[in-house]
Amino acid sequence: MAQDIRKMFENERNLSKDKMPKDHESRFLEKLENQLPNYRTKTKYSFLNIAASVVLLLGLGYLSYTFLIHPQKDNSEGTEVVSTKSIGEISPQLKKVEDYYLANINMELSQLKYSPESKELFDGYVERMDDLSKEYDKLTEELINSGPNEITVTALIDNLKLRLNLLYRLKEKLNELNNEPTFIESQG
């Protein structure tokens, strides 16, 4: 049952003496060209596309070199500028302090519940908290621009303390308002 494939093809060649017509290949290619659509690429702007790609790659390379690889230097002293984004980046102890206050602030904010009667009081405290957050951002910018110093770090910590104390006071006021009997309840 198993036959050698070479013998099979040889037998096939011997049996098939028919040859294709002489112009068969040219007719086939002609039909093929008629059936397949003729796609031509536009080469009108290819040079501009290549030039734009080169300019883009050079620009990205320069930006990555200047901002990621090459350290920024202070021109007046020739020393590297340390870019800090928060007091937590100055030292581990300050990071613990900052994390403590921020965690407590977020926890107290999440636990606050106010009623329609105390909404005005709540909005006033929230507005003050927003002002303190903006001041904290300004102090952080100052820390980034001038570098770490005791006055700025102390001001940042005091800002966090003040925000937390404001939240404690707001919580106390809301509890007082919620626990006060209203005028209607006292008459009944």
Image (spheres, grey):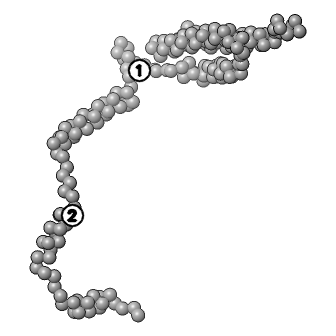
Q: Which residue does the image show at 24% across and 34% down from the upper left?
A: 55
For the residue pair 5 and 77, the one nearer the viewer reads as: 5
Q: Which residue does the image show at 70% across and 14% down from the upper left?
A: 116
Q: Mark 2 sits on what residue?
A: 35
CA neighbours of label 2 inside 10 A, class few (<14), some (14 to 19), many (20+): few
Location of residue 60 (image quadrant): top left
Q: Please tell me which of labels 2 and 1 falls first in the chain.
A: 2
Q: Quadrant of the image for the N terminus?
A: bottom left
Q: Mark 1 sits on what residue?
A: 80
- Amino acid tagged 2: Gln
Q: Position of residue 25 (x, y in %)?
A: 15, 74
For the residue pair 111 and 25, the one nearer the viewer reads as: 25
Q: Which residue does the image show at 67% across and 19% down from the upper left?
A: 109
Location of residue 50 (image quadrant): top left
Q: Position of residue 13 (x, y in %)?
A: 22, 89
Location of residue 125 (image quadrant): top right
For the residue pair 42 and 129, the one nearer the viewer reads as: 42
